[in-house]
Structures are given as structure tokens and as C-alpha cells.
Amino acid sequence: MGARDQHGVEPPWEDGRGERAFSVVGKRNRKVDGMAKATGAAVYADDIALPGMLHAKFVRSTKAHARILSIDASEALALEGVHAVITGKDLPINYGVIPWTPDEHALALEKVRFIGDEVAAVAAVDEETAIRAAKLVRVEYEDLPAFLDPHDALANPAPQIHATPKKPERGNVSKRVKLEFGAVDDAFEGAAAVVEADYTFHGTTHAAIEPHCAVATWSREANCDGLLTVWSSTQITHYVHRALARVLELDPARIRVVQPCLGGAFGGKSDPFGFEFCAAKLAMVTGRPVKMLLTREEVFYLHRGRHPMELRYRTAAEADGTLRGVDARILIDGGAYSSFGLVTTYYSGQLLGGPVHLPTYRFDSTRVFTNKPPCGPKRGHGSVQPRFAFEIQLDELAEKLELDPIELRRKNFQGQHVETVNGQRITSNGFLECLDAVERESGWKERRGKLPHGRGLGVAGSMYISGTNYPVYPNDMPQAGIQLKVDRSGLVTAFTGGNDIGQGSSSVVRDLVAEELGMDPAHVRVVAADTDLCPVDLGAYSSRVTFMVGNATIDAARKLRRQIVQAVAEAWEVDPQRLFMGGGKVFDLDAPEERSIPTREAFQIAEVRFDTLGATGSYNTPTLGGDYRGGTIGASPAYSFTAHAVEVSVDEETGRITVENCWIAHDCGRALNPMLVAGQMEGSAYMGLAEALFEVHDVNRFGLHSGPSLLDYRMATTVDTPELHALIVESLDPEGPYGAKEAGEGPLHPALPALSNAVFDAIGVRLRHLPFTPGRVLREIAAAREARATVGAAEGGA
Amino acid sequence: MATRIVELAVNGDRCEVAAPDHWTLLEVLRYRLGLTGSKQGCDKGDCGACTVLIDGEPHLSCLTLARLAAGREVTTIEGLLPAHLAAGGDGADPVQEAFDRCGALQCGFCQPGMMLSARALLNADPHPSREAIKAALAGNLCRCTGYTQILEAVEQCVAEATDARGDAN
């Protein structure tokens, strides 16, 4: 049982007059690793260089779908400087981040499933030799029909991209989820208004600026039977640890996984990957340290980005706008492997239960395998696509019923402390405040519908999880653990398995410890994401870290605090209630001048009283979720809520959309550090708008990636990014750390539909198919004109 | 692949480095000099993470042959703080301080290049407009921030420079 029910939303200390105030939380504190990053001192995976280190490179498939007939590495091995070549036979054990779908191998075993699939790995004395050697590995293939279109893969059960001998009827379906809540057909029957349309969400990728990299050593000095250490650019140290043990058939106690400083992830570093297994295996085979650094091109093959989806949505409402039901059918293009796809398929429907109330709802989602780079979780995993469709549906409904789109959302607001139709427990909910904020700041009432032709405003909302009570592999242990070590110097070191991927989770840990112990944050150090040193945390995904690691941190700090307060109170012979820890001191509230000592001395007094000091803390989720298969997926201890207003100008001659402003109102519970929260909100909105306008991750008709570079994959620069206005809303969640919820993924969702809705306000054209490139926009404008002309002619004729 | 000696001046120090002719400045900085603050994000000039200053001008070190930097002053991110101290300043370079203070360093991977581009801009023009800042940083991709806090950081540097000028007057 974690300490989830005990923290409360209030500051931890009363000043004796019943007043409470935060001293660290809520301020724009600098990050724990900010200056290390600013000065170039921070060490990322590729910055690690060890004596005698070899460099490894992959041999990648040149075929979209083929059987491997033979692999001949003799020429490569004969090259001077080459130390080893490994193939699928050397690492034959399957794995997958989701235990139910272990359909991956470190290197292809019998088949390759997309162009870029990993076939062999070469270790050589330097990178250039490894690249030359990789080109000398001869692979003989037998071509198989490749499916590049999800419709083709669905229509053709054979050949199967992944064989399921016991269930051949599965064909190329990776996962299907059909769920219905309430009587949806009845809801549509007799509805005053129904809107129905098709929507398309294209593929996009994370494109973190740091390419993936792992360094591995196999050391006998540290353990006479051998200790494997892997430094990897991962956001899930614990799952990598487990996967290495499985695939390498090693006792996990002989494996150490460390995440160095991480150069961005966004979900793209949340699977165990071939480069980690291969670096490790090559280190064991050669007895030397091995580095495996992917090129930018290879990062595009690794992918795990946003799933392309084709979505058909119907929404029914009363004449006054009250929603009656939603009916959705979704085809999901999964690419070549499962990755998180089982969860994605659920998420494509499960996260629509708020912030507007749906009395009835059903979805039917099918994920299929195709011979393309595998899709996975990208910021807003699985729920950005359905949110895109649904929030445009709401705009279409508002248009049809002649209602203001913000009013429509207000009218249907689900409220706080309610349960959704699919059984999710909603606690705090600041969505109305979010709507108010974007309405006010964007000048909505004065400007929407009244701007000159070509300029418009659009709105959209969303909800997102703060972690999930589905812990990827079923177990009852805590989701988050932390350990505090106290030094006589006055320093507290926090050891956390939480992965700081740039979002600032280690800074949050530091600040919570400092708040609870009344310390200067500079006297708290954080050691993170090292499996030898840190208690398990499940990793940086599902927006779980602030909520779960934060609660675990407070849990540990309060245990420590009780010891310190008790020891000092005993030494002073006063009631512990009179003691206060703040400003780096412990003092008696009744006599602050006479009785006051630095925290350092208090630590020493407590060490005398209790022996060596330390504390652990943990967090686990309450039992949550609907009582049906899949009911726990999307069930979260708390949900964040967001509203965006987007202002665009549209050039109808060129089809070019310019986003002028984006107002982002996000309910993050309590903003533990408003600077970090705003950074997450702005970064999310930027990413959503950029993927709507510029970014395309796709393959050509041969299955070859259409542009695996940061030039071809068009990322927004400073001059392409609009003015982003972060409006923080604090609803104070009863179970979050001091009331905090997530901020890293929710604020992406409304960006895309709000943009589409703004274009409708600007030029009266509905954009339902992403991406909104100039060519697409011009075609949509022409089609809309033609439709109007047809209607006009028909009306004229009558 | 002839290996030759290249004479470089990096962060104020002269050094001789043996490197193959085709090696880039980024390779020499990272693999020969151990200056890993300059990052490799794409290795083909698309992302800007490898930006360094050569004679005060921002250059993509992944597209610059090390030989071409011979005899010129190279400044990497590691050089900013020591140079600021040597010039009698406190703490780190004002650009570094502002980036940290404003939350511009999320993952931090693109920021060495970003900060050097900003430093070059401010050296050339201590009072650039927001548009001029955007233009100067347009070659440096950042995937985390949405650029807002980066622009805020550079604008704070501009404001500090303005205040300093005001005091001097």
C-alpha cells in the first residue's frame, strides 16, 4: 500500500498560526541539471568513450518482406579490424515491451518485415571499419508479397507478416478491440442532430535530436561470473533491464542498466531495442566495451512513432447540443511489429470519456501489421488521433446546431468527481477554467466568426492520463520507489528509478525533498535511472513520473522528517508539534530565536538517536478501471485537461496555413514548477501544430522510407513556430503530489483539431485529413467550391 | 585516408591533432579532444546541434573539415564559461545563465549549438528584435521547447545588455 491517500494538496508545514505556504514548490526553480547542460558537461550516451571500445553497426534489410535464405559474414570477418559479426541465431529469444505480444527479435531470425529491419551486427575497431564490414555481409533473400497499405493487409490474410500457426484466421490483424458502453443505437435513434464523417491521421515520428545509442561492457572485475553494464538512451531503464535478462539468458542480478543524460525521447525510447541487445552481446562475445550509435537515418527505421489511423466518427446530440452518443470505427496501421500496439488499440477509444460527458459510446478499432517501420507510442499515445476526429465532430455539431463551440463544450462538461461511461474515475477537473482562459485570452467572443475572410479562430479540448494502473507486466509491487540517503554534511541524496528525459523529473524530486525537509534545494542531489543504485520505477511513459515518483518522494521524505523531528524534539524536550523545518533550519515555533539549528545539526542529532539515517518511499495506484476486458487500460489515478484556441491565417491562393497564435490552457493539478509546466505545454503545442502542418513519416510504393533525414522530415524551426501562450490552470488533485497531475502529453492533443476548426472559421472549409500541406489545402478548397457550386446550381434549378 | 597533423586553436588553447584528412571538425572535437559538448544530431547539417563558433561566426562543425578550421579561433560550448570568467565575469556566460533561468534547457541536446548561435548573434548585435533572434536561431532545431523559452532567454540577455548600457550612461 503506497502512501497515496496521505499527502494532501497543502504545503507540509504549518507555521504555528495555522498558516501554510510553500517555500520551494510553485517557484521557477532552475533545473537540477540545467547548468551541466548549459556548459556542455552533461554526459549523454554517445559522449561515453571507454578504453579499448569497439564500434558496432547494423546490417539492415533491403527488402520490405522476405525470407532470409542465408547470411555470409566471411568477407566481413576477414576485414582487418573486425572483431565479431552476430546474426539472429546468436540472439534467438523473442521479446516485446508488452509481455502478451513478444514478436520481436534483436536481429531478424527467419524473416525481415520492413526495409531497415535489423539482420546482423558487426563490431569493429572503429566506426568506419564497422560500416565497411557491414556492407560486406552477404544476405540472400526470398521475396514475399509486401503490404504497405493497411487495407491490403486486412484484405489479404496471407502471407502473414507474423505467423500465428494456432490462429491462422488472424491474418495480419495485430489487435482488434470492440467495446460498447450504453445503448448507442438507441441514442442515435431520434437524435435531433447527427454528424458523421471520415478523418485521416498520417504517420509522424518523435525525432528527438539525440540519436539512439548504447554502450555495453562485460566485466569480470566487478563480478567473477561477469557483470553486464549497459548505458543506454532509454526512457524505460527497468524494462530494458528485464528484456536484457530474458534475451541474453542472464541472471538480472548480473545486469546493470544506466540511463545517462537523455537527449529527448517523446515515446521513441520506450521500447527495448536491438541496438541494446546487440551492444551487450557483442561486448560479451569480444570481451571489450562496445558502442552502438544509430545514424539519423536509422532512427527513422527504428521509428515507434504515431500510428496512422483512418477514423469514421458519428456523433448524436439533442437540439440544444446535449450529446447522446458517439460511434467510432478505426483502422490502425501498425507497421511491422507490435511494440505497444495492443495498448494503442485500446487507447484509440478508451480516452474519449471526458472532458465532455458521453452517455453512450462505442468503438471498433483494428490494428493491422504492414511492412513498414513499426509504430508505437508517441506523445499522447493512441489518443491524439481519435481526439482529432472527435473535436472536429464537436465543431461540426456546433455549426449544425448554430451553437458557439465553446458553449457546446461547456454545456456537456462532465464535472468533477464523476465516472465516465467506460468506467474511469475522474477526480479533479479544471476543464471549464481552461475553456474560460482560452476564451478570454484569445478574444474569442469579440473575434471568432468576425475576423476578415482568411483569418479564423478554433477551439478544442482533451483529457489525458497521469500514469496508468496497468503496469505493462502484471505485478503488485509499487510502480514507483525512491530512497533517500542522509549525509552528516547536510546533504540529502535521492535515488530514483525515474527517467529524467529532459522533462525535469529529477528536478521535481529535488524540489519535493527540499519542500518536505525545509531545505535549500541546492543541498539535495538526485541519482536517477541506474538499476544498481536506484529502486525500481517503471519509467518515463504514460505521463506517470511527476504523479507517481512525486508521491513516492513525499512518502520517503515524510518518513525521514518524522525521525528528524522526533529526535530534535526529544533533545530539546519539547512537543514535536512545535518544531518547524524551513529555510535550512529546524526551530521551535514557540521560541524561534532561542531554539534553532541548521538542518545539518538536526541530521546529526537524528543519527545519534536512530543510527544511520535513510528512508524509502513508494507509490502504487488504487484499484481502478471498468469491470471488463481492457477496462484497466486508460484507467489513471488522475486526469489532466486541456483547451486550446488556435488562430490561423489561410492563403487561399497558395494553400498555406500560418498559425498566428496558440493559447494553451492546461489543468496540471498544481504546477510544482510553473516554468517546467509551461515548457511542457509549449513543447506539446509546438509538436502538435508541426505534425499537422509539416511532418510526414511514410514509405514510398517500394516500402522505402520517403525521407529519413531531418531535412526531408520537415520539423518546425523558430520561424515556423507561432507565438505560444501557456495558461496554467491548477485544479489541485486530491491524490497528486501536493495536487499535481501531468503536463507533458495532454497539451498536445487539442492543437491539431483546434487548428482544423480555426481553418473552418477562416475560410469555411473543413479539413478532416492530415497533414494540412498546401497541396492538400488547395484540393480541399477546390472541392468545397465545387460542392457549393453544385448545391447552388441545384437550388437555382429548383 | 592520409592522417596528418592539424593545428587548431580551440577555446583559446593551441593544439596539434592527428586526424585523417576527411575528418570533420566535429569528429576532431569529440573523438580527439574529448570536447563532447558539441553534439551530433544528424551528421549532415540539418539540425544545428553541432554548431560551434569559428572566428566568432556560427558554423556547422559536422560539415566543416577539421583542416579548414586550422589557424582560426574555434569556440565550443565548453569555452564559454571559462572565457566569461577570464574576462572578469561571474558565473557562466549570460547566455548560459539565461537559458538555465528560463527553462530553455529541457533535454539540452540541441542547446550547445543553440546557445552558440545566440552568442554569435549577441556579439554582432546586442539588441536584436524578436524577429532577428528567430532568424538567427532558425538553423538550430529544438524538439522539446517549442522555442518560446529559448526566445525568452535571448530576450533577457538583450534586456540585461540594455540595462547595463543604461547604467553606463
Image (cartoon, coloured by chain):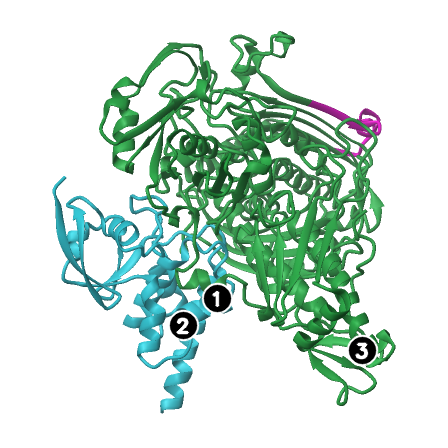
The answer to which quarter of the image holds residue A57 is top left
Q: Classify 10 Å Cα crowding around label 3: few (below 14), some (14-19), many (20 and above).
A: few
Q: Secondary structure at mark 1?
A: helix
Mark 1 → mark 2, Cα distance in angstroms:
10 Å
Percent across and percent down for residue A106 are 48, 26
Q: Can residue B1 be seen in this snapshot? A: yes
Look at chain A in the picture and name its colour: green
Q: Residue at the bottom extreme? A: B169
Q: Amino acid at mark 3?
A: Ala
Residue that numbered label 2 is attached to: B92
Using the image, determine if residue A154 lies above or below residue A225.
Answer: above
Callout 2 crowding tier (Cα within 10 Å): few <14, some 14–19, many ≥20? some
- Tell which chain the image draws in cyan: B
Vertical arrangement, residue A388 with respect to residue B120, above or below: above
Mark 2 residue type: Ala
The residue that disc 1 covers is: B100
The residue singled out by tag 3 in the image is: A571
Magenta stretch in the rendered image: A177-195
Residue depicted at 54% across the width and 67% down the height: A30
Query: Of callouts 1 and 2, which one flags the residue occurring earlier in the amino acid sequence?
Result: 2
